[in-house]
Image (spheres, helix red, strand yellow):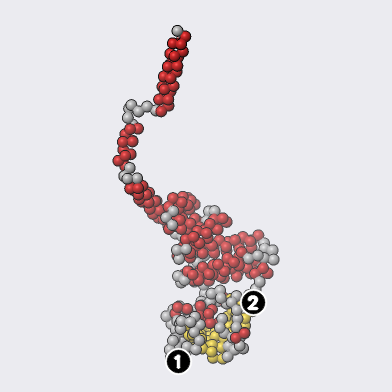
Amino acid sequence: MSELPPLEDVGRPPAPRGRTRSRAFPCPAGPDVPPVFLCPGNGLLKKKTLVPGQGVESRPQKGQDVTIRLKATLEDGTVVEEDPALTFTLGDCDVLQALDLCVQLLEMGETALIVSDAKYCYGAQGRSPDVELLAARDAPDLELLSGKEKIQLANRKRERGNFFYQQADYVLAINSYDIALRIVGSSSKVDFSPDEEAELLDVKVKCLNNLAASQLKLDHFKAALKSCNLVLEHQPGNIKALFRKGKVLAQQGEYREAIPILKAALKLEPSNKTIHAELSKLVKKHADQRNVETEMYRKMLGNPSTASTPRKCKDKLPWSIPWKWLFGATAIALGGVALSVVIAARN
């Protein structure tokens, strides 16, 4: 591996399906769709009720699994997507923000038209989702999930985080990785096989590595360092964690601590050009930092360079005598004086 990919297990964006559906739904803001309800309060996301629901009390709560009927069309009425039963966890950003925000305001059985700015969607084509809330139920109890179910759920959240990372939406990526880590770390009343335990640990390490990458993008150095250290607790030789930890310390100006960490990563993968380049850059920065510190100390001490020169020369003078010799000579002289006094006393 000559380069370090930014994330764990990220190839092409996953095809939209089930909870990871990520179709674009920016919608026209034309006069034919009046702003009946402003979801975020800024006029960029609007909901128009087409068929009333069963009352405010029937609205779903965050954390519940909701099922909606979805129909997305272009401005000219062309249907681009239709799903009779799209299910996702409300508030986990499993779908576009336009849906995640507006479905929280739908009453059971209500059909609504959503008009959204691109801020809550993506893409250039405008689409108007026609949404109906069909069902809302509590999410499954994590303690009762089997090992396979917990792995699948955590991986779905991790893949959603990868999607947000590729869209440069690092805040939502962090949110998805945090949810995945909570799933992996939740207590369980079900026994897991050794293989399932190993796979859960693998998912955890991938989430932590990707979490550190997202935190670095936001300059959250303290949080990124914590994520890297958690990876290294499980896998001391994890190259991505070592590399990112070195980068975090370097960003904080801790070159002395960063250099040996990058050297350890390079030792594990000597052919890695990315680590080579980063290490060379840090060695130069560290040398520059030491020169600056040396110059600063000289100024603080009143240019001690002139005073240090005589000291060095003094150490090299031929008549300079070690202090041990001086001590010995003094002791012999004092002994001679004492002996003379004794002899004189006897006489």
Relative to 250, 199 lies left or right: right
327 relative to 203 in the view: left or right: left
**In what element is the residue under mark 1?**
loop
Q: Is residue 237 visible?
A: yes
Amino acid type at mark 2: Asp
From the viewer's perspective, is 166 left or right of 148?
Answer: left
Q: Relative to residue 335, is residue 213 depicted above or below? A: below
At 43% from the left edge and 89% from the top edge, which residue is drawn?
30
Looking at the picture, tell me which residue is in the foreground, 178 or 124: 178
The mark found on residue 32 in the picture is 1
Q: Amino acid at mark 1?
A: Asp
Tell me the number on the disc at residue 215. none
Q: Where does residue 119 sit, x and y in percent of width and height?
A: 45, 78
Q: Secondary structure at mark 2?
A: strand
- Circle number at residue 138: 2
- Measuring from the top left, give residue 94's x and y in whole percent: 54, 75
Q: CA distance from mark 1 to mark 2?
A: 37 Å
Judge the density around disc 2: few (<14), some (14-19), many (≥20) Cα neighbours within 10 Å.
Answer: few
Q: How many marks?
A: 2
